[in-house]
Each structure stands twice: as structure tokens, then as C-alpha cells.
Image: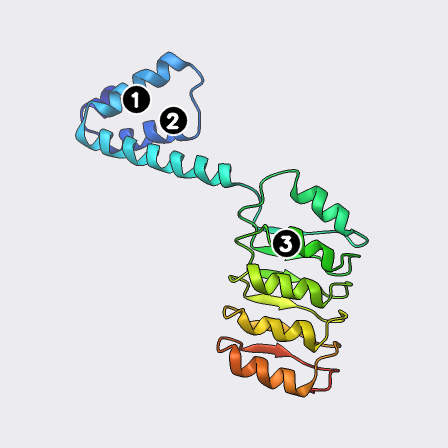
Amino acid sequence: MLLALRGNQTMVEILCLMLEYNIIDNKDTQLQIISTLESTQVGLRMYEQLCDRQRELKELQRKGGPTRLTLPSKSTDADLARLLSSGSFGNLENLSLAFTNVTSACAEQLIKLPSLKQLNLWSTQFGDAGLRLLSEHLACLQVLNLCETPVTDAGLLALSSMKSLCSLNMNSTKLTADTYEDLKAKLPNLKDVDVRYTEAW
């Protein structure tokens, strides 16, 4: 602390790191370190930066939750609802429900995930009604895997409003050639498309 007071920048950095990583348990010592940091210009600046970082971390934790999540096979709509209601998933960007037993009913839960960018529904019973709901609420969705789902043109056409979509897997669905052309025309960012084993292939 004495060296930090004399303007030794390395010691100032070490004191900041000791606070950031909670190396010192004693509250009085922590207050002494803070007082030392606030006594010099460089110390005050570094301490303010530390406080800003901690505020941002607390805000992130408050919004909270993981950014990626994969549900085990055999999971149901009820399992997904129970999981999403058990904590904060405001940061969730990537969700895989592949090979689970979810249906269109789970769309009611999915639309509560404002940060969702990637959704994998491969080999589920997710259908047209669910797609229509997603298209109305998840404008940020970029990657959608519908391979081997029961979706038809009626639901797929609703995706034309999802302008952020850049990857869309419709392999082994009831997609027709006309709907595929319509989606290509209305989704300018769509770069990665899988239409194998459909009428459009």
C-alpha cells in the first residue's frame, strides 16, 4: 500500500486485482486498500474502472443465465416449461431441442427468450402453429433447424417475416418448390439452406 501511495503503478494494479478477486477477506484491510487507491490519481482511475466492471458483471448476472442450452432427448413441452420457469434465461442465444418430444405448444415458452438466435428443432413434433408464433415474436432468430419436423408450407411461409434468418434447415419436411422460392425472395440474409428430401430439391 505504501508503494501504491508513492505512485507505483504495478502496486496499484495488484491492489485492484486483490479487490477484484476477493483475495482479502478482512473488511478493514479492504477499506484500507480502497482508501489507498483513492489517494492517488492513477489509483482512483483504476478503482473506478474496477467498480464499473463489477457493476456490469452484476447486471449481467441479474439478467442472467446461460447463453447455450441443450435439452436431453425424451424431454417434453412440460419439461421445457418447468426448466425455463426455474431461473433467468434472458441471455439464452442457442437452444437445442433436437430429438426431444416437444410440440408446437412449447412455442409459448420459446417466445419468452428475447435473445434467442439459434434454435434446433431437428426430429421433433414442432409444427406449423409453433412456427407462426415464432415468426411473430422472435425477430432476432438467425439459425433455425426444422429437419424431419411435420411443418408444411402453411407454417414455413410465416418465416418470410423473420428477416434476420441466415441459416434454415428444411431437410425432410413437406416444403414445396413454390414456398422455397417465396422464402428466398423475402429473406435477403438467407445464405445457408438445406432443402434435401423435399419437393424443392
Callout 3: 10 Å neighbours few (<14), some, many (20+)? many
Quarter of the image with the N terminus in it: top left
**Which circle, 2 or 3, is nearer the viewer?**
3
Q: Quadrant of residue 52?
A: top left
Taking the image as shown, residue 3 lies to the left or right of residue 143, namely left
C-alpha gap between disc 2 and disc 3: 39 Å
Residue carrying label 1: 34
Give how far across and how far down residue 151 sits, in percent. Answer: 73, 71
Q: Position of residue 134 (x, y in %)?
A: 61, 61
Q: Nearer the viewer, residue 3 or 173?
A: 173
Residue pointed to by mark 2: 19
Crowd tier of the residue under label 2, counting other residues whose Cα lies within 10 Å: few below 14, some 14–19, many 20 or above? some
Residue 72: percent from the left, percent from the top? Answer: 76, 51
Whole-Å distance between the Cαs marked 2 and 1?
Answer: 8 Å
- Classify mark 3: helix, strand or loop: helix
Q: Label 3 near label 2: C-beta < 8 Å?
A: no
